[in-house]
Amino acid sequence: MLNLCCDSLCQAHRYSLKKVTNAWELRKLKEILEINPKTEKVPDIFEYVDLGSVVGTDLIKHTKTLKESAPSRAQRLAKKGDVFYQTVRPYQKNNYLYELQYNNYIFSTGYAQLRPYSGVDSNFLLNCVQEEKFVTTVLNFCTGTSYPAINSKDLGRIMIKIPKGIEQQKIGTLFKRLDSLITLHQCRSNRLLNT
């Protein structure tokens, strides 16, 4: 995903954006979203997404799984707009915004499921958790050396700067479009290199 947000944009447009970002609120994640909402009922057959299924911000694979033979970590039932944050080795930035219409995708508990409250834009949120500054803060809360991980309680304490509704939505949409454009050009470039 395009790794631009508040901080990196401010460097490029230091003066003009300084005024804008200073007006943003500093909020704890747990104040703007629900972390790991309760799963009502796991479907009997579902598409399982484990930690190896997301690369960058792309879902590259999922596995049709029967509930009776599913791994114990298969617990997070996705809902459109949820952001799945990789809590193990978060420096890899393998995080995903679920935008599919299906109600049968289950993610591993290796992801924290972030369900934004009303008025919080999922695209903006995804971009914020991809920022280097955010990841550095997360790593300060992590335990373990080989597989550093953060728990959901500590994740909820991390603060981000967030604008009001319409501004946030416009920024989120801009990043989504830029990301799509970059992906399109990367695909075209790869096709040209392979011909």
Image (spheres, rainbow, N blue to C red):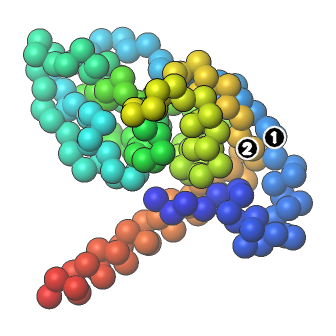
Q: Which mark is residue 25?
A: 1
Where's residue 2, x and y in %?
A: 51, 63
Side of 104 relative to 177 (left or right): left
**Residue 74 position (above or below residue 186):** above
Q: Position of residue 21 (x, y in %)?
A: 81, 54
In the rendering, at what x and y percent does residue 76 appear? 35, 23
Residue at 89 percent across and 60 percent down: it is: 19
| Left or right: 91, with 25 as reference point | left
176 relative position to 64: left or right = right
Q: Residue 79: in sight, yes or no?
A: no
Q: Which mark is residue 162?
A: 2
Instruction: Indicate whether 102 appears above or below 182.
Output: above
Label 2: how many residues lie within 10 Å, few (<14), some (14-19) or many (20+)?
many
- Give x and y (percent) for residue 36: 47, 20
Kind of residue at disc 1 = Glu
Seen at 24% across and 14% down, the residue is: 72
Quadrant housing residue 110:
top left
Is there CB contact under 8 Å for labels 2 and 1? yes
Characterize the local packing of mark 1: few (<14), some (14-19) or many (20 or more) Cα atoms within 10 angstroms: few
Q: How many marks?
A: 2
Q: Earlier in the sequence, mark 2 or mark 1?
A: 1
The amino acid beneath tag 2 is Ile
Going 29% across and 80% down the picture, which residue do you hit?
Answer: 188
